[in-house]
Amino acid sequence: MEKDWICVFHTEQSFQAEIAKEILENEEIICVVLNEHDSTFPSIGEFEVWVHQDFGNKATELLKDLIN
């Protein structure tokens, strides 16, 4: 991932990553979802949501209910 970006959410479920992305985008936080699933074994790996570090605290706060 680019310099100064941090992972604020990770999950094995693609729909949860998309929900996280929508929550952040509704607050005008630019984010990226990375698919870290293994191409040979799709059941292995996670989806990660990344934001610029300047928005890390706000993003974590917005996603706290989704994380728990």
Image: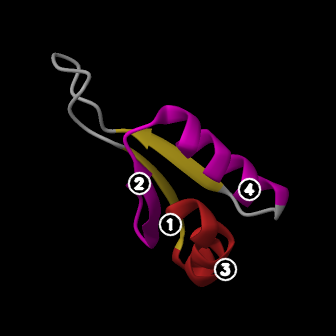
Residue 9 is left or right of residue 64, and the answer is left
Q: CA distance from mark 1 to mark 2?
A: 12 Å
Q: CA distance from mark 3 to mark 1?
A: 16 Å
At a point 25% along the width and 38% down the height, the residue shown is 45
The disc, 3 or 1, on the residue closer to the chain's N-terminal end is: 3
The disc, 4 or 1, on the residue closer to the chain's N-terminal end is: 4
Q: Residue 23 — which label?
A: 4
Name the residue beneath numbered marker 1.
68
Q: Amino acid at mark 4?
A: Ile
Q: For the residue carrying disc 2, how many other residues have a C-alpha within 10 Å: few (<14), some (14-19), or many (20+)?
A: many
Name the residue beneath numbered marker 2.
10
Q: Amino acid at mark 3?
A: Lys
Residue range (magenta): 1-26
The disc, 2 or 4, on the residue closer to the chain's N-terminal end is: 2
Residue 52 occupies quadrant: bottom right
The disc, 3 or 4, on the residue closer to the chain's N-terminal end is: 4
Q: Amino acid at mark 2?
A: His
- Label 1 close to label 2 by CB (< 8 Å): no
Residue at the farthest left position: 40
- Label 3 close to label 4 by CB (< 8 Å): no
Name the residue beneath numbered marker 3.
58
